[in-house]
Image: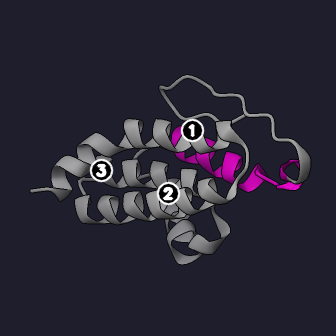
Amino acid sequence: MFSMAHSKDIAIEPSGIYKTIDVRLMNDTIKTLQRSKPKSKSRIELVKIITDSPENYAPPVFYLLSSVFLQEDKKDEAMFWFYAAQLRGRIDANICAEIPARNIMDVLNEKFGPEINQYAFK
């Protein structure tokens, strides 16, 4: 199950080889970012862990991270992580043979993109 705060849960049931992918780190990280208070020590530490080791995280974490940076009025960082999420997510989606997994990119772009794109295009 993939979930983002204030959005509808989208159940994606992988099949075949995709069932073997461990998404616990992604899900746990998203839940922790959602539940942590802005500027709390736990959020600051988690953001540092993510930004220091982005290779360990899936694109949905970067989308949410971009939102965290927007909340903190760090718009350049938000823009960087949004576009990193978009790039990595599109690569993953193009490789993936499962249509629902590809469609999640559109949902994430619609949720997180407007405010960042508005800033980026200025």
Tag 3: amino acid: Leu
Q: Nearer the viewer, residue 45 or 101?
A: 101
Q: Is residue 47 magenta?
A: no
- The amino acid on which the numbered mark 1 sits, given as a three-letter code, is Asn
Residue at 9 percent across and 56 percent down: it is 122
Q: Nearer the viewer, mark 3 or mark 1?
A: 1
Closer to the chain start, of discs 3 and 1, is 3
Mark nearest the camera among 2 and 1 is 1
Q: Residue furthest bottom?
A: 52
In the displayed orientation, state which residue is furthest to the top. Answer: 8
Extent of the magenta region: 18-35
Determine the secondary structure under disc 2: helix
Q: Is 25 included in the stretch rendered in magenta?
A: yes
State the separation of the CA atoms marked 3 and 1: 24 Å
Which one is nearer the viewer's eye here, 30 or 120? 120
Front-most of residues 58 and 46: 58
Q: Does residue 44 appear anywhere in the picture? A: no
> In the rendered image, which residue does mark 1 sit on?
103
Mark 3 to mark 2 CA distance (whole Å)? 12 Å
Q: Which residue is mark 3?
A: 70
Q: Earlier in the sequence, mark 2 or mark 1?
A: 2
